[in-house]
Amino acid sequence: MRVRFLAILLALGGFLLLVAPPAAMAAELSAGPAVTVSQGERIDDDLYAAGSTVDIAGEVTRDVFAAASSVVVSGRVGGDATLAAGTIRVDGPIAGSLRVAGGTVEVTAPIGWDLAILGAGSVSVARSATVGHDVAAIGAGTITIDGRVDGDIRGSVGTLIVGGRVNGDIDVDAERIEIRDGAEVRGALRYRAPQPATIAAGARVLGPQEHTPRPAATGREPKTALDRAIDWVMTVLLRLSWAIVAGTLLILLLPQQTSRATDMLRVAPLPTVLWGIAALVVVPIATLLLLVTIIGIPAALLLLGTWLAVLYLSQVLVGIALVRLLPVRSFRGDRRLTLWLSMLVGTTAILLFRMLPLPFGWTFWWSLVIGVLGLGMAWTAFSGWGLPAPISATSPTLTAPQPLEQAESRLLTGEGTPSPASEDSSERPNEER
């Protein structure tokens, strides 16, 4: 979970570097495997840094924004510091506020204003550190305060350990609170926790104490087999409802196109599979390449949206195609009611197979096969590439091309080809002459 959160932050940091407003474009922008501000170096502006590691040993007179796997600030920051990384260490003074999001955070230097913590696993404020105002936490794992906090400690945290001095109040939601020997809380201690706080004999809490009991976040009770079965049925019904609504709209709006696309698995199975694999791989790559350019962003969004829509509708298209493979000619019509009934039966079967609790990643592989087939059918029907000649060939006369089903019927029954009797009758006048 933390790795995914960090990856999102890194991507967001890189995006912000690309779309920074003109005012920010005048600042120092640094990106690469390793970004370093050497000791003795001075940046008289904001610093935006992104890379594998960011090391700020010099001075930044204004704000710092950094996203990396590891960030170390040992120099002075004259403004605020916003840091997102797996490991963060702040050994230099921060004149403004320090905002952190990461796995492990260690602060050993003074912070002029607030310390804001978002989703960190472990945060420690050493005895040598001070926070000039508040400590605000959202979803932190463990916070250890051995230094001095001149304001309040607020927010939500798994475990709060106070071994230093807090001049304000402590008002938190926590699983566990420990006030160690030698700690001092000059304000009130208000907390919501499963158990009362552990307060050492040598600790001092000068303000009022208020404990609001709440259940521990230990997880839900184990479900019975009946509960799991009910959950499975409800999940299947919900996803089936979504698919049926989407398939109904597709059939109402594009009945002929849907009929043609679902025929591709029967009349051109190999091109359908090959084009599906190509679309599954090529479209994401093409989307990334288009996003790199400014003028290609609208095309990339359109391409990606279409790709995702076809992927979702693959369960509908493949469901109809499987029903139309049955040796029942009435299933192959392009009437809306026929398509809808085929969709209802086929999509239900597809979804039930996908939801079976089978091992070895069954759900993933089944969904991958359905996605490949759906993309292949849509592209083959749209482009016509790979279709056999009898399907795309037109009649030698000036009449309009016949539908696919009528053409196949004539080929099977022999209609449209001259019979031997007609050939004999056409040759008899010549013989009589």
Image (cartoon, grey):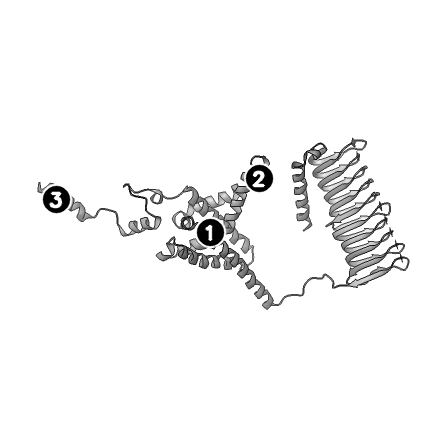
Q: Residue 316 appears at what percent x and percent y?
A: 47, 53
Q: Considering only vertical position in the picture, is 310 above or below 39? A: below
Total tally of numbered discs in the picture = 3
Q: Which residue is mark 3?
A: 428
Q: Which residue is mark 2?
A: 288
Secondary-structure class at tag 1 = helix
- Position of 342 compared to 5: left or right? left
Q: Which residue is mark 1?
A: 250
For the question of whether residue 317 can be seen, the reply is no
Q: Residue 279 appears at what percent x and percent y?
A: 50, 43
Identify the residue at horizontal 56%, vertical 60% (top origin). 235
- Position of 166 compared to 428: left or right? right
Mark sitting on residue 327: none
Q: Which three-letter amino acid code belongs to the residue tagged 1?
A: Leu
Q: How many residues crowd around disc 1 within 10 Å: few (fewer than 14), some, or many (20 or more)?
A: some
Secondary-structure class at tag 2 = helix
Q: Nearer the viewer, residue 191 or 281?
A: 191
For the question of whether residue 177 can be seen, the reply is yes
